[in-house]
Amino acid sequence: MFNRLFLDHPRSVGESYFGITGRQWPSARKCFLGSIACFLHAIVPAAFTQTGSRTVSRLYDRMVVNRAIQFAKATRIAPT
């Protein structure tokens, strides 16, 4: 059970538990702060009018676009 919960996924992507945890903290922090901004925007529509969408866009770029670029560099394939 311990391996399934804490070690299987990091191993499947070639990382250690602490390696994957350390890389995910910045994303988790940004998601948390973005969700607070969205919550406050829901209460006061004039507040944080672009913060939620900007946060999602930046996280998408970091997690999807940059990963594709890194993969392309690692495999020497031009990104699309």
Image (cartoon, rainbow, N blue to C red):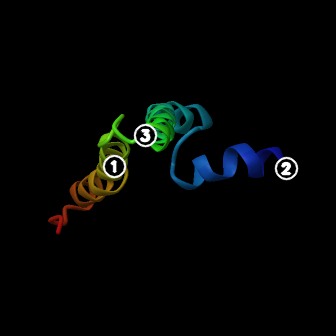
Q: Looking at the image, do the residues carrying marks 3 and 2 touch, with CB atoms under 8 Å apart?
A: no
* Rendering coords of residue 7 (x, y %): 68, 45
* Rendering coords of residue 70 (x, y %): 27, 52
Closer mark to the observer between disc 1 and disc 2:
1
Quarter occupied by the C terminus: bottom left
Residue beneath the point at 58% across and 31% down? 18
User: Which residue type does callout 3 highlight?
Assistant: His
Residue beneath the point at 32% across and 53% down? 67
* Rendering coords of residue 48 (x, y %): 35, 36
Closer mark to the observer between disc 1 and disc 3:
3
Q: Which residue is mark 2?
A: 1
Front-lying residue, 57 or 75? 57
Question: Circle 2 sits in a helix, a strand or a loop, which is it?
Answer: loop
Is 51 placed left or right of 28 in the picture? left
User: How many C-alpha atoms fall within 10 Å of the one at disc 3: few (<14), some, or many (≥20)?
Assistant: some
User: How many C-alpha atoms fall within 10 Å of the one at disc 2: few (<14), some, or many (≥20)?
Assistant: few
Is 5 placed left or right of 29 in the picture? right
In this rendering, is residue 63 above or below 17?
below
Q: Looking at the image, do the residues carrying marks 1 and 2 touch, with CB atoms under 8 Å apart?
A: no
Q: Which residue is mark 1?
A: 53
Closer mark to the observer between disc 3 and disc 2:
3
Question: Circle 1 sits in a helix, a strand or a loop, which is it?
Answer: helix
- Asked whether the viewer can see residue 28, the reply is no
